[in-house]
Image (cartoon, helix red, strand yellow):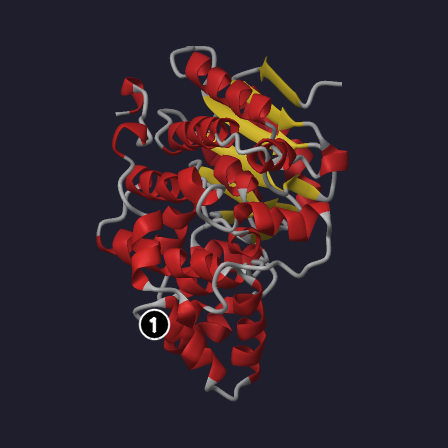
Amino acid sequence: MADIHIRKEGRAGRITLNRPKALNALTYEMCLDIDAALTLWADDAEVALVLIDAEGDRAFSAGGDIAEMYETGTKGDYAYGRRFWADEYRMNARIASYPKPVVSLLQGFTMGGGVGVGCHGSHRIVGETSQIAMPECGIGLVPDVGGSFLLALAPGRLGEYLGTTGARMGPADAILAGFADLFVPEAHWPSLTAKLAETGDAQIILSHTAGPPEGRLHILRPEIDAHFAGETAGDIQRALRHSHSAFAAEALKGFNRSAPLSVACTVEMLHRLRGAPSMRRALDLEYRFTWRAMEQGDFIEGIRAAIIDKDRTPRWQHESAEAVPGMDVSKMLMPLGQNALSFEEELA
């Protein structure tokens, strides 16, 4: 059975992720197939909109399939991972700038690479089971696939909170933070997809929407904005450590599980992007980090601890976010020169 099902159905170009047992984790080939389909359909008069969904109840996509990256990276071969990330990021950019409506149905877990496919389109739909997160700092990366762009646009300091702790967002929280647009009860999804394919009219989604179950981020906003407003990740860590609130204690646990270098770079990236938000600028910054992540960062160790040995005790380069020198952050985010991420001309 194919990992992805791509076809035209009525007026819709349909992309269905089809690895439910693997929580629809994205392989490199899936990224290339999505990009090829989007390229083909952009000028296809028969395709009025693109509909992206996934098989299974547990996840739209829980992330990228990083086993091959780990295997090659541990052998000192960083080319595969760099190529994967570059092509994936170009696909993310294509979705964000697509000339036709892109509708995504985000059930269950939508994390990491799943955010890159599902959260940059024009009509991002969540349901009762939706759980969206950017947990990359926990494996020695930074929020990527354009996730840093979404985090930089989130209200207040939600971006720093979500990006450094990997906190999960339910449907209402995802809408508040800008990772989703509309709540549609999942029982209505089959009839909605049928009508979208029949009509090619994304506006019919509005007749299916409802109010989402109450979230928690709007209640936590004052504390998030107060604790995550520091200039550096070290400032945030100190603020959380010196607070006596239940929220601060919970947030500090998530913060401290993440790689210190990753959280330090995440905070710096969001501060840079907030001043001049741009999807391409975000992807460029992300690629600066991921290009170096295996050789100079904590990615290999993060995967070892979380996926390979599963001991959950990563040995990070730095003891804490407070201990990360500014120079180390600068080195990870320096321009890549001739290795910089490039975008196809048609995406301009």
Helix, strand or loop for disc 1: loop
Q: Nearer the viewer, residue 135 or 152?
A: 135
Q: Is residue 19 left or right of residue 46?
A: right
**Which residue is nearer to you in this view: 199 or 336?**
336
Residue 4 percent across, percent down from the top left: 64, 22
Q: Residue at x 73, y 57 (%)?
A: 311
Q: Is residue 124 above or below residue 222?
A: above
Relative image position of residue 252 (x, y in whole percent): 53, 74
Residue that numbered label 1 is attached to: 229
Q: Position of residue 330 (x, y in %)?
A: 29, 53
**Label 1 CA crowd tier, 10 Å (few <14, some 14–19, many 20+):** some
Q: Quadrant of the C terminus?
A: top left
- Three-letter code for the amino acid on which mark 1 is drawn: Ala
Q: Is residue 200 visible?
A: no
Number of numbered discs: 1
- The residue lying toward the viewer, choosing from 9 and 62, is 62
Q: Quadrant of residue 171?
A: bottom right
Q: Is residue 235 left or right of residue 310?
A: left
Q: Residue at x 54, y 61 (%)?
A: 258
Q: Quadrant of residue 213?
A: bottom right
- Whether residue 324 sits left or right of residue 218 in the image: it is left
Q: Position of residue 38 (x, y in %)?
A: 46, 20
Rendered position, 152 above or below 104: below
Q: Is residue 324 visible?
A: yes
Q: Is residue 5 left or right of residue 146?
A: right
Please tell me which residue is depicted at 50% across the width and 28% down the height of the picture.
84
Residue sticking out furthest to the front: 76
Quadrant placement of the N terminus: top right
Residue sitting farthest toward the bottom: 244
Residue 280's place in the image compared with 200, above or below, is below
Q: Residue at x 42, y 29 (%)?
A: 86
